[in-house]
Image: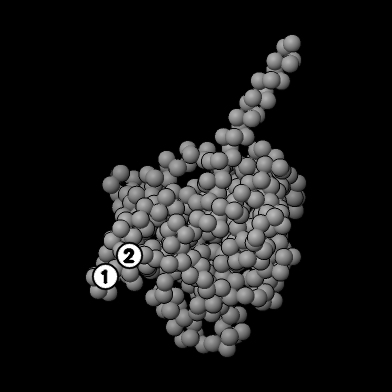
Amino acid sequence: MGGRTVRERLQGRELKVFSFCSMALLLAAGAAGMVRERASLADAVKGLWVIVISRDALITDYFGLAGYASAFLNAVLVMGMGLWLLCREKVKFTGLTMAAVFINVGYALWGKNPVNILPILVGTSAYALVHGSRLSRYIYTGFFGTSLAPLVTELVFELPFGRKMNFLVAIAVGILIGFILPALSVHTASMHMGYNLFNVGFSAGILAFVVVCVLKSFGIESESVLIWREGRPLWIVVGLFGYFALTFLYGLYLCGGRAEGLLKVWKHPGRAVADFVLMEGPGNTLMNMALVGALCAAYICLIGGDFSGPVVGAILTAFGFSAFGAHVRNYAPVLAGVYLSTLLNRFEPTTPGVQLAAAFAVGLAPIAGRFGVIAGIVAGMLHTAIVMCTSQMYGGLNLYNNGFSAGWVAIIMVPAIESFLMEYGRRKRRDTDA
């Protein structure tokens, strides 16, 4: 027993250890933010309270709203809640776990906080209870379903019943959302056939649209906002690249210093369900996550973009989903498509929504993985056009607006491409038979 290596002792717990270490690094980022802003712990806690009591509709940058220290502290709390639930339910850490954990961490910088996600998680727990199952069966839907957390906050501000009653109604609606989404997400997955990695974002967008329409029928309307902290703070840029470097080295260590397993990851088209941890192991997966995260961050640097809370959150989301379908080979064409679209349309690469579209285009990576580079580029271009319109449909109350848009891109493109390929195959067979 005493002769076991560190690698052997980590076996089966590699991603759990990685996740808790990542949470410690988030806490360190919060401390760095306090130093940069010359803030005390009390100031950071006050900023956290500002995050909890403020509207969270798209786009609400917590860096701009409350400061770096409070935003990172909020991310630590959201991540801690998620990890506690995963450990409590004894969930095995896989690629899907990484996707769920890091999308929540990312959005904890611009829309989610421990208060507004809780009712949705309670609703998912109630769904599991009604169906005689443990929460572990639906926990990922619950995590992804917190994309509608801003709707919970918004109802507190917009309903006409008084603040206390508004709060109770908002909690009830949040629970209802968490109860509905598990069943709804099963049906929407068949619509895009696994070519949109952000499936719950698509189903949440549909649900948000319905809820917003109901509210509008009673004269209650929500308006999207734009709080966006510009600039590229060196400490955040260096911190991100340093984190990705450490992730790569950790993955390399788990693989015994051999990186050729990455090539196996890159051979997968990425169509859901593509859990790289189960397919190729945690070491290769972590190296892939690091490379995709670095590619995404490098793109923002090259276009002169902003490392705002939403952009950093989007990069972390792409990082997480690189354990569940995305890799450099299938993401790069879609990313290129987003950039190329700005050479033709009226948007600049540095437009806030387009910066986010570039990172979140990772959700369409399976299209490039299955149908090739040209299809990936077209998907990225189409995604940019759609995502700049869809937020208005639900007043910015679905955080996964890019997931909703990606769903429509997949629904439009995949049947058309498959129909073309089928016809091409039939003609080729006829020519061969002749």
Three-letter code, disc 2: Ile
Residue 5 found in image quarter? bottom right
Classify residue 428 by image quadrant: top right
- How many numbered circles are shown? 2
**Visual colour scheme:** one colour
Residue 101 at x, y = what percent?
A: 51, 58
Q: Nearer the viewer, residue 325 or 349?
A: 349
* Placement of 304 over or under 279, stated as above or below: below
Mark 2 surroundings: few (<14), some (14-19) or many (≥20) residues within 10 A:
some
From the viewer's side, name the closer residue of 253 and 205.
Answer: 205
Q: Can residue 98 be seen here?
A: no
Pick the quarter of the image with the C terminus.
top right
Task: Provide residue 185's location: percent of width, then percent of height.
Answer: 43, 45
Of the two numbered discs 2 and 1 on the same chain, state the one appearing first in sequence. 1
Instruction: Mark 2 and mark 1 in contact? Answer it, CB < 8 Å.
Output: yes
Residue at mark 1: 160
Residue 19: x and y in percent read 55, 61
**Is residue 318 left or right of 428 when viewed as pictured?**
left
Q: Is residue 312 visible?
A: yes
Residue on which the image places disc 2: 220
| Residue at the image point whose x is 65% and y is 76% from the top | 231
Nearer to us in this view, 181 or 386? 386
Residue drawn where x is 69% and y is 47% of the image: 377
- Crowd class of label 1 (few under 14; some 14 to 19; many from 20; radius 10 Å): few
Residue 226 disc label: none
